[in-house]
Each structure stands twice: as C-alpha cells, then as structure tokens.
Amino acid sequence: MNAMQKKVLLEMKDYFFIAVGVMLYATGVTLFMLPYGLTTGGVAGISSIVYYATGVEVQVTYIAINSILLLIAIKVLGLKFIIKTLYAVAVMTFSLWLFQRLAEQPSPDNPAKMILPKLIGDEAFMACVLAGIAEGLGLAFCFENNGSTGGTDIIALIVNKYRQMTLGTVIMVCDIIIISSCYFVFHDWYKVIYGFVMLIICSITLDYAIRRRHQSVQFMIFSRNPEAIADAIVRTGHGVTILDGTGWFTKTNRKVVVSIMRLRDQISMLRMLKNIDPYAFVSMTDASGVWGEGFDAMKVGDRQKKRRILVCATNNMIKIDDARAALGDSYDVRSLLEVGCDTRQDFYSVILGQAPVKRCSFVKKFFGFDCFYLERSGRVTFVQGNYEQAEYDVEEFDNLAALKLYLDSKK
C-alpha cells in the first residue's frame, strides 16, 4: 500500500468516525434533551430554545445558524480548514431529522400531534446525565478524527484569530449565555441548572474519553538481565532506555530499563517480562501526557513568531553563520550539536564522511528535522519529509539563495 492509499484510508476513517460521533450527539439531543425541555451549549442549545419557544424543529435552526457561520468561516478561515465541519453539520442536520421521525409518537391528549416520548419516565436529572454522556462521547469521536460540529467552535476560532482570547474562554462565554437564556422561555431556574449540569457532564465525558484513548504507562524495570528485556521491548516496536543505577543496600551497579507505551500494551508487556525474568522488580506508573515519537505531537501555542527549524549537517560554525545570514530570520538554522547529534560519539560519528544525501537522511531519521548540507562549492543538498517514511524528498540547489527561494515558495 503506497502513501496515497494510506492517506485516502485515513481520510475515510476520519469521515466514518465523525459520522458516528455526530449520530451519538444527535441521539443525546433527540432522546434525552428535547423530550425533557433541557438546553445545552452551542448551536444545538440555541436550536432547542427556538424549538421550545416556537415549535420550529431543531435541525432547521441548526442548519440555518451553521450555514451563516460557515459562510463567514470560509471567508475568514478558508474552505480547506472547515471541509470536515461542513460534512459534520450536514450529517448532524440529517441525523436530527431522522432520529426525531423514528422516535416520535402520537400525543395521548391529541393523537394528531406527534411528540417525542420520555423514555426514562419523568426523571429529568437522569435524562440530563444520559444526554451529557451521549453528547460528550459524540464530540470525542469528532475531535479525535479532526472533525467539529461547527457552531460556537467556529465563533471561537474567528474571535481567536483577531483577539487574544483562548478558544475555551470564548466557547465558555457563549455556552453560559445560551444556557442562561432558556430561563426566558421556561421561567424556571431548575432548567438553567440542569443545562449547566449537562454541560459539565458532557465536558467531563469528552475529557475522559480523549484522555483514556491516549493514556500511556511508564515501566521502570530492575532486572539482572536488562539487555534481554531491552532487546525484547525493541522487537515489539516500542522505545527503551537503559539507565545506570546503584543498589544502595548491596552497593552494586544496576541497570534500570525504562519504557513508555500505551495502556493497551501493558498486559503483553507484563507477560513478556515474566517470561524473561519472573524475579524482576517492576514499577508501572500512569503517564498522563506523552509527546514525541510514536505518541502525540506537541500542540501548544507559541506567542513568539514561529520559525521553521532547519539543521545544517555540520558543526562548522562558519558554514552555520553563512546559512543563517542567507536564509534570514524566518528560519532557525541549527548545527548538528545543537540538535543533539554529537559526532564525537560512535553512533553519530558514522555520518562523517558520508555523501550529503545520506548525511542529511541520517539527521532526518534520528532527529526528525528537515536538513541540508552546504558544500564548499556552495552547492546545497536539502532533505525533507515525514521522518517515519522509508525514503525522503531530496532537492539540489546551486546555492543558499536558491534554497531560500524554494523554502519561501512552499510557505
């Protein structure tokens, strides 16, 4: 399977699970929120208030408001950014309509009027809990697969683009206003309180679902056979580090094997350890956040102007200074030593004397950064791409000025 086929399959997976998430959210709205007169945040909350006040079905208000917001977002944020949001809004609109048609039944007082039944009796609080759980799980599916249900998410992104306000702050303010406004329809503060309770349950469920999926564990293994354990861990595709330690009771040197992996892999890890050294001392702790190779990418805002990091495959500071001067302030040019490639060590010294392409590919493979090599003649070899792929994209340039023109054109 080539890279294009993998990309298509990943996109298809995203769209499938976004649809699953949206339908879960629509289930919470249709079966547990609307029949009990509850209100949530976002456009779904506005739509429910309009429904209670006028009888206009939620999907009509939902698509109307989102259409306006999406038109604004296309102009401000760009079509590529919101393509999956367009898809999610379309699926949500259809799901809300379909689930209402499937769930509604004739009113006992007026058989000609169709109503949504209260499936769990008159207990509004339990409906509030179930609606919050369903909506939280639905949002988790969407967010985990690069999707969004639109609404206040779009408002938050637009505000964040022009004002120094975090996305969470904007969404929270919108939700508080929306939920509080349901008082003017029902004149019942219990409805407002239930709305905030449902919002909190939804948020907790969303956080738990995302955190649970990404939960990792760290193993610290004290064994008399650390090399065999480390080799076995590497064969499973996980990273491992061996630390030097001292057993203070025996005053002898010991090796400590450290490895981090997903929670789902802990059982196979323990079985492997028991098979190699059943007398090993093992400590396993939860790793609430793991970023880096094989795990999640670090997603954090940077208030400073972001510069693209490029490695010049040398420690010759004359070449480094020439590259920095030629490429300008938009690029952060670093030497081998500055990214941790100490060629005085045996493992890293292998790149010395190699052809420019192999030298740059080595840096790309083990450090992840795009890399270039500057020859004495001024010719430049540039290697870029995803560090996990087997072969990288290679470009050749006559000089640093030509490299800068190429990099600027790709911004």
Image (cartoon, rainbow, N blue to C red):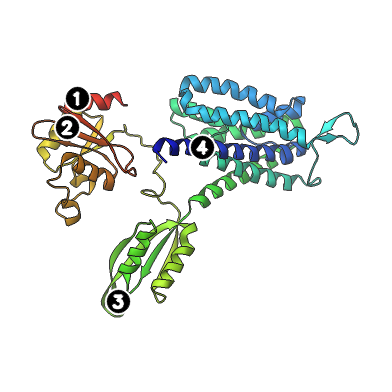
**Disc 2/disc 4 C-alpha distance (Å):** 45 Å
Which residue is located at x 39 percent, y 43 percent?
298
Residue under pointer 2: 380
- Horizontal relation, residue 38 to residue 303: left or right: right
Instruction: Choose the circle earlier in sequence order: 3 or 1.
Output: 3
Number of the label disc, if any, that sits on residue 248? 3
Q: Give the residue type at disc 3.
A: Trp
Which residue is located at x 79 percent, y 44 percent?
119
Asked if residue 105 can be seen in this view, the reply is yes
Question: Which callout, 2 or 4, points to the residue nearer the camera?
Answer: 2
Give residue 240's position: percent from left, percent from top: 34, 60
> For the residue labelled by badge 2, is the local secondary structure a helix, a strand or a loop?
strand
In the picture, residue 242 is in which quadrant? bottom left
Q: Give the residue type at disc 2.
A: Val
Labelled pair 1, 2 in contact (Cβ < 8 Å): yes
Residue under pointer 4: 168
> For the residue labelled by badge 1, is the local secondary structure a helix, a strand or a loop?
helix
